Image (cartoon, rainbow, N blue to C red):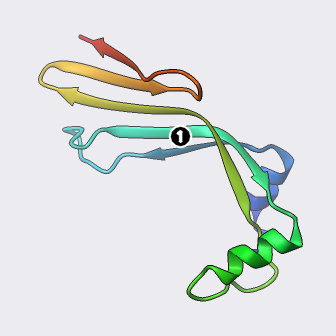
Amino acid sequence: MYGAVKARDLQRDGRFALHAHPGGEAMTGGDSKLSGRAVEVTDEAELAAFAADLPEPPPSPFHLFRLDIQQVVHTTLEGDALWVLNWHPGRPVEKIQLH
């Protein structure tokens, strides 16, 4: 929604974290988090190209943000062990086992 509080927050400070936990207390499927910076797309040609690729164009005007992902963390339980997979751009995935 154009002018929404969340959009204005990202315009002011682009840091974001997106957290997903699809399972229940048993941690089935694990728990994931993406974090980084959201950069607003303001170029009219890019906005028009994005809207043209959608099945139904969004109401105009609209906000569009490109996500610069700086970290991905996935945590899961395997038996009695807690596993943390940690990724940063340009580095291999770090796999940490906690007991």
What amino acid does circle 1 point to? Leu
User: Residue at coordinates 60% horizontally, 81% vertically from top-left?
Assistant: 54
Residue 6, image x, y percentages: 72, 58
Write down the quadrant of residue 29 in the picture. Answer: top left
The quadrant of the image that shows the N terminus is bottom right
Q: Find residue 59 and report its image quarter.
A: bottom right
Q: Secondary structure at mark 1?
A: strand
- Label 1 Cα crowd, 10 Å radius (few <14 / some 14-19 / many 20+): some
**Residue 12 falls left or right of residue 72:** right
In front: 98, or 87?
87
- Residue 35 pos. (x, y %): 59, 38
Number of marks drawn: 1
Whether residue 49 is situated above or below residue 20 in the rendered picture: below
Q: Label 1 belongs to which residue?
A: 34
Name which residue lies at 87% across and 64% down: 42
In the rendered structure, the answer to whether residue 15 lies left or right of residue 23 reads right
Relative depth, front residue between 29 and 9: 29
Q: Looking at the picture, how far across and down is residue 82, in whole percent?
A: 26, 21
Image point (26%, 48%), residue name:
23
